[in-house]
Image (cartoon, rainbow, N blue to C red):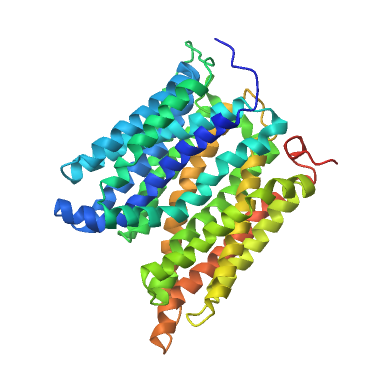
Amino acid sequence: MSSPAPAVWNPRLALLVAATYFMEFLDGTALATALPAIGADFGVPPADVNVAMTAYLVAVAMGIPFSSWLAERFGPRRVFTSAILVFTLASLACALSPGLAALTAFRAVQGFGGAMMVPVGSLVVLRGTPKDELLKATAFLVWPGLLAPVLAPLVGGALTQYLSWHWIFLVNLPLGAAALVAALRLVPEGGADPGRRLDWPGLGLTTLGVAAVVVGLELFSEGRPAGWAAATLALGLAGLAAAVGWMRRAPRPLFDFSVLRVRTFRATQTGGFVYRLTIQAVPFLLPLLFQDGFGWDPVHSGLLVAAVFVGNIGIKPATTPLIRRFGFKPVLVAAAGASAATFAGCALLAPEAPEALIALLLVASGAFRSIGFSAYMNVQYADVSAEQLPSANAIANTLVQLAAALGVAVGALLIRAGAAWLPAAGDHAAAAALPYRFAFMAIAVLMIASVVDSALLPRHAGTEVSGRRR
């Protein structure tokens, strides 16, 4: 087995991986705004087009566990560059699709390319970065996950309205070509293990479990029959439980679950999972509150939702100094508590509230969201050894995909629960907003629950990464 390159901080490589992450994340969510246009072109109801989005999510979730073995077997450079090529060519095929069946098939191929592109790229950056430079590296890797959910509706809507839905895919062609050229120049050789055998039972059980969980959550979020959704979700959870049981006994498992004994990593995959779930629900809930609850038009709503983006970006220069000054534990606890307060504030908003006050609340929400997200991204690998890194990276990326799917599904379920459980208000405008108020209060409670694991971390957790003195 060839030795990996020595750990040297390379900001250009981190920026390249962040750009591919942003491309994959944006493409995965922007299509939602184009469903009516695609349905009209293909002569099918817009709701039917959602199968293409589901195929993409399922392919991404199923491909991530496989990508971990591919990177070890063939080397991260070969797999990462191949993934960019697959994603880019599949984007072209999506744009040229003559019907919904073809679009769905090519979206699945595109999703598989994205599944290899993002976690393998992250692994390249993490392996090549010393622990004391990890804050800088993850500062690059964090922003796509924060910005893409906010920008996707705007980008997708603009491309669909002023050009056509095909351009959601066509814009990936020059971006993918540039990323491929940069990857061939920047990604180091090495790291391949030709003798690495694939844990087929572990892979089969994991992909079955992850796919069934994602499909079950999608069925719940789309309001499909609860029995089918619950059965699919139960199948997925059973598959994942069987996968964990198998891999704990296998001599060469797909994932090494001993990494969960690392206290900081375990906390970021439990409480951090709930944290990511809640922040993924917010970009879904806010436009619905403003448009369905308050009766505002999409432009009015979109301009205010963009305030979350301002908060995300505005606080970024201060995030690393905050972590270095106070340490991970206080930052995680404070960010979660403050985020919960902003969600409760969103639940109390009214259409007649001053827009400056609403914008200020959303800027604050985006800022605290960014601080917490960055802290979780940084501390999760703080105490993970180089040997455990591939398994840790694959587990973390799989749970990120599940959190993204679960965030939308939970948001949709909370809206329905609010509509079913809350008494109808006499005023029609007030009644329209009630389910969304309930949903925001519920995710505020979930956000508080996410902080339990962080509050139990040692006071000086992750100091090797944060650089904070004891």
Q: Could you say where residue 281 lies in the image, as x and y percent from the top left?
A: 48, 58
Q: Could you say where residue 60 lies in the image, as x and y percent from the top left?
A: 39, 38
Residue 391 seen: no
Residue drawn at x 28%, y 56% is 162
The foreground one among 367 and 240 is 367
Q: Residue furthest left?
A: 43
Query: Looking at the image, how many numbered discs can be counted on the residues?
Result: 0
Quadrant placement of the N terminus: top right
Q: Is residue 428 above or below residue 302?
A: below
Q: Residue furthest bottom?
A: 426
Residue 239 seen: yes
Q: Report the side of 370 relative to 116 (left or right).
A: right
Q: Report the side of 277 relative to 38 (left or right).
A: right
Q: Residue furthest right?
A: 470
Q: Report the side of 336 relative to 120 (left or right).
A: right
Residue drawn at x 46%, y 44% is 401
Q: In which image quadrant can residue 140 be found?
A: top right
Q: Report the side of 46 relative to 280 (left or right).
A: left
Q: Is residue 357 above or below residue 111?
A: below
Q: Could you say where residue 216 lies in the image, as x and y percent from the top left?
A: 37, 50
Residue drawn at x 75%, y 41% is 461
Quadrant placement of the C terminus: top right
Q: Could you say where residue 415 lies in the image, as x and y percent from the top left?
A: 43, 68
